[in-house]
Image (cartoon, helix red, strand yellow):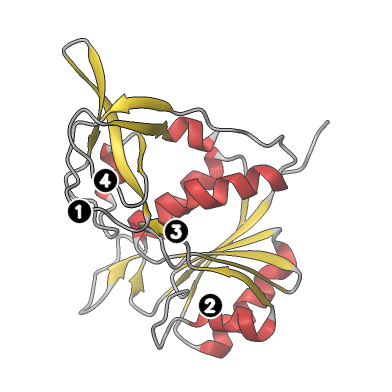
Amino acid sequence: MLFRSLKVAILSTGDELVEPGMPLGPGQIYNSNRFTLMGLLAEAGCEVVLCETLRDKREATRETLLRAAESADLIITSGGVSVGEEDHVRAVLEESGGLSLWKMAIKPGKPVAFGAIGGTPVLGLPGNPGSVLVTFLVVGMPYIRKRQGRNPKALSGERIPADFTISSASVRREFVRARKETRGSDPVVAAFPNQSSGMLSSACWADGLAVVPENTTVSPGDLLTYYSFAELLS
């Protein structure tokens, strides 16, 4: 059985966003999320039909979301779903569409949202680059597989000893950007030293995610479930 590619619109939010290669002014940052999502969606077999930046205006956000809904099967936004004065995506969904989910007990990526506008589903990801990577893989990919008509897939992962320490337990489930390494002849999972949600370089260093359950500390040798990026995107 054949299916057409899922058509996806990518909308980045924020007046501070500048395209890579352009000079940065005070308070500006490069729009890395657009290119992260384009690469991930290509790996997932989706067709990107629209890429735009939403400026911090409520009505402009509403108009662009409604326009994207006309051509896309799914809209993915980055930023605009938290509680700041200029976070308009969540508010527009509540006013002009529907909001089914907001906030998940995961780290990074707590303010993830899901709703619809103009009959088209909207997956609202946080604005920080590390959170975009994690929430797309953990929340977005299962939904995309379902929309593509693929059979539900139970990820197997691997149980591997940790080669790092987390001394402070979190009430949220943590997805650590990590990679599988070898110590002697045995595999271990190592964590990128800086797990800040704004640290995109962790995505280049890592080759997967290690899962730390809620209310859990980690010591070297503790067994953790590790999922490779290849498995998460397959």
**Label located before the other in sequence (3 or 2):** 3
Give the residue type at disc 2.
Answer: Val
When the figure is inspected, residue 130 is found, relative to residue 184, above or below; the finding is below
> Would you call the spot at circle 3 few (<14 residues within 10 Å), some (14-19), or many (20 or more)?
many
Kind of residue at badge 4: Ser
The first of marks 3 and 1 along the sequence is: 3
Mark 2 = which residue? Answer: 89
As measured in the structure, the alpha-carbon distance from the residue carrying label 3 to the one carrying label 4 is 17 Å
The answer to which quarter of the image holds residue 27 is bottom left
Mark 1: give few (<14), some (14-19) or many (20+) Cα within 10 Å: few
Number of labels in the image equals: 4
Write the residue at 43% across / 70% down.
Answer: 79
Q: Answer yes or no: do the residues labelled 1 and 2 have beta carbons within 8 Å?
A: no
Image point 42% across, 81% down: which residue? 83
For disc 1, the marked residue is 168
| N-term mark: 3 or 4 | 3
Dot 1 lies on which element? loop
Which label lies toward us, 4 or 1? 1
* First of labels 4, 1 by sequence position: 1
Q: Give the residue pinned by disc 4.
A: 202
Mark 3 → mark 2, Cα distance in angstroms: 16 Å
Name the spot of residue 174 as percent of width and height, x first: 35, 50
Q: Does residue 178 appear to the left or right of 60 in the view shown?
A: left
User: Mark 3 = which residue?
Assistant: 34
